[in-house]
Amino acid sequence: MSSTATRVLASVLHRSWKIRWSSHFAAQTHPSFPCVDQHAARESRLIAASASRTFEASPVTDTGPEPPYARPSPLSYNVYRHPQPFQLTYSASLPSFEIAYETWGTLSPTRDNVILLHTGLSASSHAASTSLNPSDGWWEKFIGPGRPLDTNQFFVICTNVLGGCYGSTGPSSIDASTGERYATRFPIVSIFDMVKAQFCLLDHFGIERLYASVGSSMGAMQSLAAGWLFPHRVGKIVSISGTARSSPGSIAMRYAQRSVLMADPNWNKGFYYDGLPPHTGMKLARQIATITYRSGPEWDLRFGRKMRNADQPNSDESPTKLALCPDFLIETYLDHQGEQFCLKYDANSLIYISKAMDLFDLTLPAINQLGLNPAQRGLFSAPPSPAERQTVSKSHPPPANPSPYFPDLVEGLRPLTPIPTLVLGVQSDILFPVEQQRELVDGLRMAGNSRVSYFELGGVWGHDTFLLDILNVGGAVKGFLN
């Protein structure tokens, strides 16, 4: 055979071998993206449903000990309508607003047994089951006869916050002046605005004074703000896993959530109500949030490094199939949390309410900058006398290494001096670390409040401990209220 024929034959054999092995390699390593396929399927369902605007979340499945968040029916709660203009902290007034609320227990003839329960960022007013909505609420086991919020003794009120999307006025509400949804034309709201709207509801009920203001997470901010704005109208304060001043760390985490949401093309600068919702951004935002709500030690115990197909034999005949998608159980958990949330909550409400959390600051310069200082308006009783302040200071010396803003925080907390306060912190909380609750306690005591109780809880549930630890959280709350 000639050299030319040899080269031709070698070239043919080489191409044949290359094609055969390339095909084999492609068959063996063709990338699989089931999560991308699921996203495409969801997008197709949303496009099909866009005409009727009936976007439905995936069916709820068992995801662990945490209570489910569900979109309540408009028939399952009450609505207070405030027809007058309502002045806001950072913006012009709202012409009117509505607040969704639910109640438990019986209001006493003297109207002095009221507990105002404040929610976290994304919760509805449905804290516990009612005749209108028999499904479990987000604090179901904490509310009822003989429970921490004992309905044999107290009349409990819970609202969906101003800016929310579960019955209260927010970005998804209709602007009466235009007949269209507010979208991002909705004004910036603050924690103070949320609380003032709640007190309009209390005025509607003829309730002059709360027995207690109770809240966890963002609700703890509201609970402090209620006592701060209306010290004569709040008998006790319960602040669980909260803070008097949003830290840069928690601001950064919420900013990351808003960033991925606003990067979703469907968000369309907030004007998505006539099109597809930004479901991808919402899913990613919820995944980031979930990481901050729990703790690494819990996930070690709960998931470890287990994979979702770990029960399949790993052999040549049945290899473990991996993908560039969720394979570890912790990944599938985050994926499910995001999937469940992305169509249940309004994206603009998430942006507005998380921003309100970032802006919360009870230090004196921040208060003065907003023109909210109660001392200038005579809204709280005289400050403690020098002798009283000295006694409190000796009993509770300032922290060894206070933050630079601690003196301003002490002065800002002075309106809360006369109000007995319970503060709870959780050692595994990474969203509102216990340093923030310790600082709040130190600040209250240095300001002259001698009736501050503080409990610091262990456990592995992280920030969500307030939803899950009925024994310790519930026990502390029940003991304080009684």
Image (cartoon, rainbow, N blue to C red):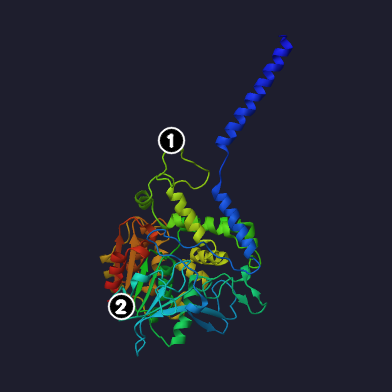
Q: Nearer the viewer, mark 2 or mark 1?
A: 1
Which residue is under mark 2?
A: 145
Q: Residues within 10 Å of mark 1 (few under 14, many from 20)?
A: few
The number of numbered badges drawn on the structure is 2
Q: Position of residue 428 (x, y in %)?
A: 35, 55
Is residue 288 visible from the viewing direction of this image?
A: no
Name above or below for residue 162 compared with residue 350: below
Who is closer to the viewer here, 80 or 199?
80
Looking at the rendering, which quadrant does residue 136 occupy?
bottom left
Which residue is under mark 1?
A: 315
Horizontal placement of 421 versus 366: left or right? left
Residue occupying image coordinates x 44% and y 86% = 205
Disc 1 secondary structure class: loop
Q: Do the residues labelled 2 and 1 touch (CB within 8 Å)?
A: no
Horizontal placement of 361 versus 48: left or right? left
The amino acid pointed to by label 2 is: Pro
The amino acid pointed to by label 1 is: Ser
Q: Quadrant of the N terminus?
A: top right
Q: Distance between the residues labelled 2 and 1?
A: 56 Å
Looking at the rendering, which quadrant does residue 5 occupy?
top right
Name above or below for residue 348 compared with residue 380: above
Q: Position of residue 283 (x, y in %)?
A: 53, 57
